[in-house]
Image (tube, grey):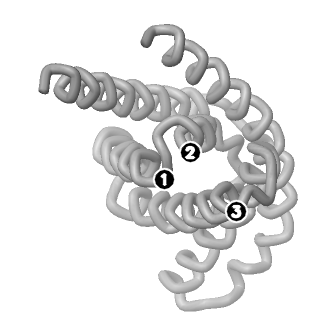
Amino acid sequence: MKKNTSERTERAALYGLLTALAMVLGFVESLIPIPFPVPGIRLGLANLVTVAGLYLVGIRGTAAVTVLRIVLTGLSFGNPYSMAYGLSGSLLSLLVMAAAKKRQWFSPVGISILGGIAHNVGQVSFAAFIVRTAGVFYYLPALLAAGCAAGAVIGIVGGILAERISQFLKNRN
């Protein structure tokens, strides 16, 4: 019984650390000006935690961390629309990445690129629904190119992060 409680405590602490790290990375990203003429292009630093989370805590844990991050960030720095946009892209991205990881089709880099693409498709689709026009899809090619580039970098760093944290957790036990 004691070991079970200890394991749950460690898992809760890990989820809390992942959520906090994602929030900090998202906040840091908001401070970085990106001089692109297309609105919505971002680095996706918080997705480092999503990629690492898939390898560390699985889909359910990563989904919990992602939803918690979006809600807490939205309540702290945004509004209901920012939460809705964040959820629309992040949940589709997470589903695509989880499916690709489960089938072992890609490395963390490929999984992250797919996640970047799905995130952009999810957000642009949600935007088209909200504004009731397909005109927002005009931005999609530029967003997809940026999503692929950022996804590659995030995948490289996220894979390294997952490996290092995993080694640290194994060494503690």
- 27 is higher (above) or lower (below) than 138: above
Residue situated in front as seen by the camera: 104 or 83? 104
Name the amino acid, label 3.
Arg
- Image quadrant in which the N terminus is located: top left
Q: Determine contact: label 1, label 2, CB under 8 Å.
A: yes
Give the left or right position of residue 102, taking residue 73 as reference. Answer: right
Label for residue 54? Answer: 2
The mark nearer the N terminus, 3 or 1, is: 1
Residue situated in front as seen by the camera: 56 or 39? 56
3 vs 1, front mark: 3
Label for residue 103? Answer: 3
Q: Quadrant of residue 143?
A: bottom right
Label for residue 157? Answer: none
The residue lying at 21 percent from left, 29 percent from top is 4
Name the amino acid, label 2.
Leu
Location of residue 12 in the rendering, given as x and y in whole percent from the top left corner: 28, 30
- 51 is higher (above) or lower (below) than 28: below
Q: How crowded is the residue under tag 3: few (<14 C-alpha within 10 Å), some, or many (20+)?
A: few
**SS label for mark 2:** helix
- Image quadrant in which the C terminus is located: top left
Gap between marks 3 and 1 measured at Cα: 13 Å
Residue situated in front as seen by the camera: 77 or 118? 118
3 vs 2, front mark: 3
Q: Which residue is tagged 1?
A: 59
